[in-house]
Amino acid sequence: MAELFARPASHDPAAPPVQVDGVCLNYDGTAALQDVSFRLAAGTRVAVVGPNGAGKSTLFKVIAGVLRPTSGTVRIYGGLPGRHVCIAYVPQRSQVDWSFPVSVADVAMMGRIRTMGLFRWPTPDDWQVVDAALGRVGMLESRGRQIGELSGGQQQRVFLAQALAQGAELVLLDEPLSGLDMPSQAAIFSILDDLRASGITTLVATHDLNLAAERFDQIMLLNRRLVALGSPSEVFTRPLLMEAYGGHMHVVPDGDGVMVLTDTCCDGEEGHD
Amino acid sequence: MTDLLAWLAEPLQYAFMTRGLLAALIVGTVCQVLGAYVVLRGMAFFGDALAHIILPGVAVAYLLGWPLGVGALIAGILAAVGIGALSQRREIKEDTAMGVIFAGAFALGIALLSTQRSYAVDLSHILFGNLLGVSTGDLWLMGGLAALVILLVVAFYKEFLVLSFDPVLAVTLRLPVTFLKNLLLVLIAVVIVTSLQAVGVALVLAMLVTPAASAYLLTRRLPAMMALGAALGAAGAVIGLYLSYYWNLASGPAIVLTETVLFFVVLLFGPSRGLLWRRRAATA
């Protein structure tokens, strides 16, 4: 039965966690991603921003090895993404069936399934890993609750616990902040700080450009192609934002920087994929 | 009390009733283990289509004088794998493709059966089941298939759980997703074949979905949902069979009606997700 599993990819800790070269992806004739190339250093926290339909979720799925690029290559720690088990993709909240009959601990335990292997049941060691992960995200007391009973921020934290239980070194979060109040966002950021301290690379898709500017090491500006990747002050400039958002945004000069007002911003759902 | 015992014991003096009761218990129980996944993954239409697609297999087996279960099993597994492959393609929506094949296969099955003189009786048994015609051999086959299904569902429990809850996670964990999907489809086909004799092609969907839906309303964990579904499925099967004996109803429909009544009772009066409870909570 073991041959059913793809053999794990080569994992070179010295290689960059993400290296994308010339990736294009076409959906039914339209280009969702065009010639995207970049590399990230370990432990970086990157905000992925861009208008609706910019291909943020698509890029995440390509990096996670869920979608195969039409052309170009993706390397995760030097290996092909389709065989890596060190990548966690946290879906948009609207993509999850919250009425599914599973508890908080069940969802976190799902991250351990590959480590456990076929025909094995969770051992006390596995539960210890899961409880430690739930503890790190502050959800240990809720371990027995059904996931639909949680608030939006708590639901996000359960998936982060799952990524921790998986031992992920690259975490992709799709719109984790939208629809959350300030304290819930702060709780997510303190977990993201914890991940960064452990050398875990995180990519976070978001519509909130203010949060992106304030709380992230790097900004990836995406609109099917990679418009810019760099520090917030390098990326959040009038020409680059205009290039990414086109007429859907107003850029207002504001003392030492620019203030940005977008009208494509919305909570939760995105139109693409 | 003794009256009740006598009432319960009376049908069991007939061997065919005892066999029917055992068959109903097996079907009522095993269907729910997979019924839980059918309900959670929204595969009710798939289940119904699969049951109908099996008909030509049953008809061919019948014309060749093979055991009906064998024909059904071959057709069911072929159909499950075929639908699995079809759903990977993009030319046509999955439910449309299923609808086309389902109706066509069903027509083929009826056409094959209509060449026979005893057409009407055979067709009604295949469509609506003939629990009281279960032989000892059938019972062994049903029991064996049921044991196999339960064994596989337990063996792949955590993989099926991830596949149903978060298919993307199943991919990023690099689980053998295609294999697991097809295995689940084949297991559903096997369970449908197991239930064929009890409730027939047309009603098999109820065995798969109805008790699982009741259990879904009452529980918050998947193992509990499966266990409660199995209990409700078995209870409905036994009660339905007794009703069919005393009220002289066809056994398949009697079982399905009992399950349906149980579902509406749960829907109305169930704690937490029940409609009455919700209304009271809303007004309080």
Image (tube, grey):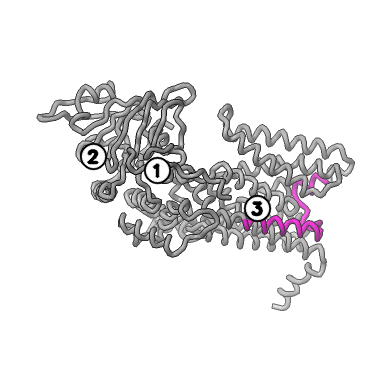
Disc count in the image? 3
**Residue occupied by mark 1:** A11
Q: Where is residue B169 in the image (x, y as percent from the top left)?
A: 45, 45
Q: Which mark is residue B207?
A: 3
The answer to whether residue A212 is left or right of residue B22 is left
* Front one among A238 and B225: A238
Q: Which mark is residue A22?
A: none
Examine the rendering and report whether any part of residue A77 can be seen.
Answer: yes
Examine the rendering and report whether any part of residue A32 can be seen.
Answer: no
Asked where in the image residue A232 lies, by quadrant, the reply is: top left
First to last magenta residue range: B122-151
Name the mark nearer the viewer: 3 or 2: 2
Marks 2 & 1 on one chain: yes
The answer to whether residue A264 is left or right of residue A118 is left
Separation (CA) of disc 3 from disc 2: 53 Å
Question: What kind of residue is marked 3?
Answer: Met
| Residue A247 painted magenta | no
Q: Residue at x 46, y 38 (%)?
A: A82
The answer to whether residue A43 is left or right of residue B98 is left
Q: Please state the chain letter of the residue tagged with numbered disc 3 in the rendered image.
A: B
* Front one among B18 and B192: B192
Q: Please state the chain letter of the residue tagged with numbered disc 1 in the rendered image.
A: A
- Check the image and report above or below for B229 versus A83: below
Q: Counting other residues with Cα less than 10 Å from the Cα at mark 3, is it few (<14), some (14-19), or many (20 or more)?
A: many
Q: Residue A216 carries which label?
A: 2
